[in-house]
Each structure stands twice: as structure tokens, then as C-alpha cells.
Image (tube, helix red, strand yellow):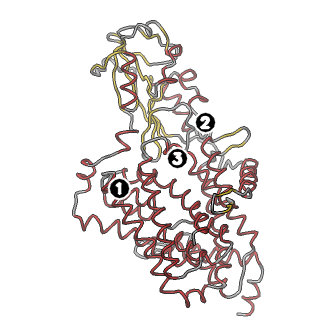
Amino acid sequence: MEFILHLLEEPLLLLFVILFLGSWLGQTKIKGLSLGSAGVLLVAMTFGHFGFQVSSIVQNFGLSLFIVAVGLQAGPRFFRMIRSSGLIFGIISIIIIIVAAITTIIVSKVFHLSPALSIGIMTGALTSTPGLAAALQATNDPIASVGYGIAYPFGVLAVVLFVQLLPRVVRVNLMEDLQRKNNPVKNETSPEMMTIEVANPEINKRTLKELKFQKKHDVVISRVIRGDRNIIALNDTVILKGDLLVTVGAQSELEKFCSFVGVKVATKLKNVDHIKLRKVTVDSDEAIGKSLKELNLRRNFGVTVTRFERAGIEYSQNARIRFERGDVLTIVSSEDRLNDVEKLFTRKTFTVTNVHIFSLSIILLVGILLGMVPIPLPGLGTITLGVAGGPLFVALIIGHFGKLGPIQARYYQPSNAVIRDIGLALFLAGAGTTAGQGIVTVIQEEGINLLIGGALITLLPMIIGFLIARKLFHLSIVHSLGALCGGMTSTPGLGSVNQLIDTEDAAIAYAAAYPFALILVAITSQLLIFFL
């Protein structure tokens, strides 16, 4: 035993022993449930209790990597959802976090818990590791990890059980309820098709390039019907009065475009054997991170992209959005042209990773510097974004644009996951050993209070968030549960919803709510220090 203890005094060996045991514990499943990354935290806390300590440099390095990977992942979806009807799910997510924050303040005052411990409980109840990272930076107290570790298991189980039991208690047919209730994603963001007869004389005998429809109208013309002819809509296609334009876009945009161009007519596609429609999945390093404007598919390949799908949500084509791996494009053209363009999006290379160290270093450097800047809050003093908030904010911005000058932010997707997972493991190993030094004392003094507090901070936001989704926004149970899982950052909960019904609607709601929760928990963790 003395020999083993002596070996563990070697910092590098200690680190890998914690990572090995923690990852093994985290992937061990009991009735389909597992601790995941919290396994590393619990093992590290155990080692910390016995006096072992992982270097703070390792902890901060891991935190920086993890938080940047999270920001780069959430950036594109976060800002897009703000501009769409996904904002409804974002509002639900925000309400969940606000209720959790208010509950945390009450729990802290009633049970006389320290600010760091209270904020740690909140991040554990919401299963938010970025929130824990922000809490540790804001409080500068490792005891936050103890609260997180204690509240996390209940936070996972409560959401999963709520999702599984609720449909049985209310006895509602989920599919009928889904079709009957409000569906904001489908009503607002899903593109539709409309055929419009050209009646405006200003359009007559002008090419699509000259007309520049997409600069004024968020629609896409996929083909032009002239008599018995079907013409693929390209930049040099001439539009004549009486032509029928097969147009794709959101319903509201189609209506505005129709009032400008002419009149809506029934869609009757004839003699279209030479025009094909194909769905193509983006899986090529040459296309990832680039936009339609950069690829210029109409000019280079003679094809038209009418819509694209990402994370289960279908959108109208947008020339400025940069492609991510897994995007599904709907493309219209002739068979041979479709074959050519499909090679562009599916071409395989031997590149396993494309992490741009130069870009990653700049993001980290600028983020850490930004995190050091004091931000005045009237009546509350000043706050800094810290090592967590600064890099997260910078990564969100750069992740949204994908590329800013020499900075590249759209990595090969597994590469971003590797950065995130390694960073998280290193961070939890350091945070856990630091927190473990006082865990036994805290549990002995506050054990029952921690459990009750964690339960309240989990249950109240969850129940209130669900009721608001149902009663205020009139969402279906499936959408309500999906938004709830996103607001609670509960991926296991989403998995349980997916087992209840064969539809992607829950995943759509989750994807819309999750980025808001991801960012807001981190911000709330820093602001709560002023109220506790």
C-alpha cells in the first residue's frame, strides 16, 4: 500500500489514475443510467479527501479547452435561434434558469448555506458543468464542486423519471396531442413551396441575377415553368411575364414575395424527367465551414439548393450560413449535375483532424484577456467574465461566423468533441481533488440540507417550466418535454423522450432551448454571488 501511495505522489500518474477510474465509473450503467463525466468528479473528490491534489494549472488548462469547445459548438445555433421562432423554446429555457436562481437564493437563506455551496448545488441540479466552471471562477471556492457532485445524480434522475412518468399520469396520446397543439418550429421555420405566376412587368425579360430576389426576399426559386417546359432556375435564367416560378421559403416570406411578383397558382409539375431533387448530406472537409455564397453552386455546378436541415430543423436556403457536418441539403438540378455536386459534399479525405492550433490559441488568448476586464453593475459593484465566461463569449462569436480573418472555428466535428472531452476531464480532475479536501466535513454538517436543497432546485424549475410551455405557449407534451430537457441541459432526459414517441420534434425543441440554458447558467452562476 505504501508503494502505491508513493507512486501516486507522481503528479502525472495521479492524474491518469483519476481519469481511468473516473471514466470507468462514469460509463458504468445501472438500468440504463450512468454518471457520465460526473464519474471523474466523484473519483477526484475521493482522492482529494485523502490529501492528493491535481495541479491547478492542469485544472485551468482543461477549463479553457472545455469552455471554448462548448462555445464553438453552441455559437451557430444560439444566434440563429434568437432570430427565429425557436426563441419560444429559449424563453422557456430562460424561465427555468430564473426559477432555479430564485430557488437557490431561498434555499441558501433558509438552510444557511455558503454562496459557493449554494451555486454548486444549482449547477448540479441543472447538470451544467459549464455552470460549475463559472461558479468556481466567480466564488474562487472549491466547495462549489461538492454541491455540484451531491446534486448532480438527483438532477439526472429527476428529469428522466419526470419525462417517463408524466405521459402515463396524464394519459394522453402523444401523437394526437402533437398534431393538435401549437408547433412553432413547423409554423414559422419550416419552408414550404408555392408556385407564383409572374405578372409584374418590371420582372419581364430580366435574369435572376439581375433581379437579385434573395437580397429583398428570403425565398429560393427552384425552377421556372414556361408552357410545357421546366427550366432549372440558375443565375442566367431569363424570367418572362406569364412564367410560373416554383418558390421555396417560409409561408410569411412566400406571401410577401407573391404580392410583389404576381399571383399564386396551383403547382402542376409536368415533363420534369430531366429535373431531379436529391437530399445530400454534408460530410466533406472541403465544404464544412463554407457558405453557399463561397461555394457558388449555381454558377459552378448549375444546381439550386432550396432548403437545408440541421439538428432536425428544416430551414430555407440561406447563402450566408456556413455548413456543418451532418447538414442535409435539398438540391434541384439534372441527374449529372447532382452527381457532380454530391461528390463535393461527400468527398472523403484521409484527414482525421483539422484542429487549427493557431486559431484555438487566439480564441483562448482573447477570451482570457476579455475575462479579466471588470464590468460595472449598477448597485452591485463589478463583475468579470473570468477564465470561463471570457473564452465562452469569444468562442460564441467566432463560432457563429465560423471564420474571422485567419481564425478558423469550424473544426472537423469529432475534433471539437475531443477538445471538449479532454478539457472537461482535466478540469473535473483538478476541481474534484480540490473540493474533496472538505467534502466529509460539509456532508456531516449540511448533508440533509444539501439533499433537500438540490431536490427543490431541480423540481421547481422543472415543473414550472413544463406548465409554462403547456399553459402559456400551448405546446404539445412532446415539445414541452423537449424544451424542458434543453432548459435543464439534460441529455439523458431527451433520450427518454425519444423512447416515448417516434418523432424528431422533441430533439428540435431541445436543440432550440439548450444553447440558451448553456449560456445563461454560466452567467447566472457568476451573478448569484451578489445575491447570496
Task: For marks 1 and 3, give the one nearer the viewer.
Answer: 1
Tell me the amino acid under the disc marked 1: Ala
| Residue 261 occupies quadrant | top left
Residue 472, placed above or below residue 25: above
Q: Nearer the viewer, residue 524 or 189?
A: 524
Taking the image as shown, residue 447 lies to the left or right of residue 382, namely left
Q: Nearer the viewer, residue 502 or 433?
A: 433
Taking the image as shown, residue 420 lies to the left or right of residue 201, namely right
Please give the label number shown on residue 77.
3
Tag 2's secondary structure?
loop
Tags 2 and 3 in contact by the CB under 8 Å rule?
A: no
What residue is drawn where x is 53% and y is 40%?
Answer: 282
Residue 301 in picture, x, y percent from top left: 54, 23
Q: CA distance from mark 1 to mark 3?
A: 21 Å
Tell me the amino acid under the disc marked 3: Arg
| Residue 387 occupies quadrant | bottom right
Tell me the amino acid under the disc marked 2: Lys
In this rendering, the count of numbered labels is 3
Q: Which residue is mark 1?
A: 469
Residue 88 in picture, x, y percent from top left: 41, 49
Taking the image as shown, residue 159 lies to the left or right of residue 147, namely left
Name the N-terminal-most of marks 1 and 3: 3
Q: Residues within 10 Å of mark 1 (few under 14, many from 20)?
A: many
What residue is drawn where x is 49% and y is 12%?
Answer: 207
Quarter of the image that includes the C terminus: bottom right
